[in-house]
Image (cartoon, grey):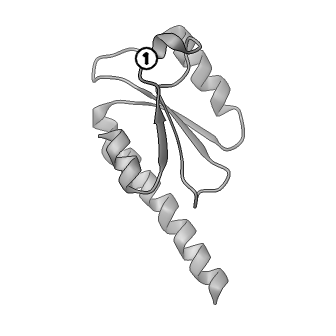
Amino acid sequence: MVVHGLKVRGFDVTVIPDMRKTTAGWPDLTAWHPRLSGRLYCFELKTMTGKATVKQAVTLRHLASVPGIVTRLVRPSDWSALRDEIDVALEHVERSEEEESL
């Protein structure tokens, strides 16, 4: 749901198929959008009952401290709010681009 939703909005999405082959705690999904300059989204995907490990929580906090990196633990029930947030950001960029072209 999250991956598809991001892709249809024009994001380039990377999901690591086997997280055992990465650094412990690294987020499941990274995404960027060519019109959202300076932003990288890093999401830890969980089921409705899944819990983040300590290493995952520490990694998300560290990444969030870097300017331009947006981190979040995302559950299926979070998609509608996340979708709305991303749509607002894209609309803001679109309005700014329209104003610049006037």
Q: Quadrant of residue 48?
A: top left
Residue at the spot 53% in from the left edge and 9% down from the top edge:
54
Q: Is residue 40 above or below residue 96?
A: above
Residue 58 locus on image (x, y percent): 60, 16
* Quadrant where the N terminus is found in the figure: top left
Nearest the eye: 65 or 45 = 45
Q: Is residue 88 above or below residue 48?
A: below
Say which residue label 1 marks: 18
Nearest the eye: 14 or 63 = 14
Residue 95 locus on image (x, y percent): 54, 75
In this picture, residue 16 sits left or right of residue 102: left
Residue at the spot 58% in from the left edge and 57% down from the top edge:
34
Q: Is residue 56 above or below residue 67?
A: above
In this picture, residue 80 sits left or right of residue 96: left
Residue at the spot 58% in from the left edge and 61% down from the top edge:
35
- Check disc 1 and report its element: helix, strand or loop: loop
Residue at the spot 54% in from the left edge and 53% down from the top edge:
33
The type of residue carrying mark 1 is Asp
Nearest the eye: 97 or 52 = 97
Q: Is residue 49 above or below residue 15?
A: above
Mark 1: give few (<14), some (14-19) or many (20+) Cα within 10 Å: few
Residue 4 locus on image (x, y percent): 33, 45
